[in-house]
Image (cartoon, rainbow, N blue to C red):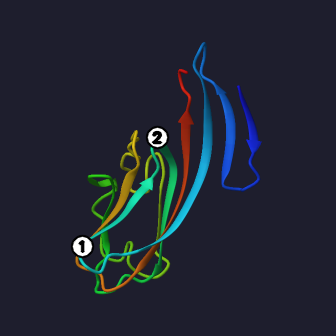
């Protein structure tokens, strides 16, 4: 059984979830969006703690809003220390040009496994084939957080 109540922000839906005897908890659906400026000092762009603790991503959408210069396209997208947890082997022109978009879900658009789940906040990383001169990637994510399970 779940009772859904909007918190009127448009960014979160709260639900009381019955997991069974003595296992009540709260399920919240969140939305996060962020413009990430790519690193111009190396081949890895890191957004610290992008993924909140106990986050279970539903979908992650990436869109290049300022072209990545120096032909330094994104080759992989990672979580924490796993550089290609979300996507690997991305080629030239996939995430590089203005308005390039990729979406990833339980099984991402490349057909590989979805997202890891962590008890602590995790970084989002982009690995580039070369050092970018400039660029911005807009990231949009919907995710679940379950709290109070088993309390």
Q: Which mark is residue 43?
A: 1
The CA span between labels 1 and 2 is 28 Å
Q: Picture coordinates of residue 11 (x, y %)?
A: 66, 55
Which quadrant is home to the N terminus?
A: top right
According to the picture, the residue beneath numbered tag 2 turns out to be: 54
Q: Nearer the viewer, residue 77 or 118?
A: 118
Label at residue 148: none
Q: Quadrant of the C terminus?
A: top right
- In the image, taking residue 71 as reference, residue 33 lies left or right, namely right
Residue found at the far top of this picture: 21
The residue under the point 59% across, 55% down is: 31
Which residue is drawn at the image coordinates 74% and 48% (left, top)?
7
| Residue at image coords 23%, 75% | 42
Q: Position of residue 81 (x, y in %)?
A: 26, 52
Answer with the quarter of the image where residue 136 lies: bottom left
Q: Secondary structure at mark 1?
A: loop
Disc 1 crowd, CA 10 A, few/some/many (<14, 14-19, 20+) = some
Q: Position of residue 8 (x, y in %)?
A: 77, 53
The foreground one among 148 and 28 is: 148
């Amino acid at each position: 059984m779940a009772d859904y109540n909007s918190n009127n922000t448009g960014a979160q839906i709260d639900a009381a979830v019955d997991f069974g005897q003595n296992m009540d908890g709260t399920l919240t659906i969140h939305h996060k969006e962020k413009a990430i400026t790519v690193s111009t000092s190396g081949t890895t762009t890191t957004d610290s703690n992008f993924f909140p603790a106990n986050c279970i991503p539903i979908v992650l959408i990436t869109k290049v809003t300022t072209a990545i210069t120096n032909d330094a396209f994104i080759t992989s997208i990672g979580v924490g220390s796993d550089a290609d947890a979300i996507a690997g082997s991305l080629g030239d022109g996939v995430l590089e040009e203005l308005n390039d978009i990729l979406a990833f879900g339980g099984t991402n658009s490349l057909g590989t496994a979805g997202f890891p789940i962590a008890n602590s906040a995790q970084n989002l990383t982009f690995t580039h084939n070369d050092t970018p001169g400039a660029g911005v990637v807009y990231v949009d994510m919907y995710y679940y957080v379950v709290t109070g399970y088993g309390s």
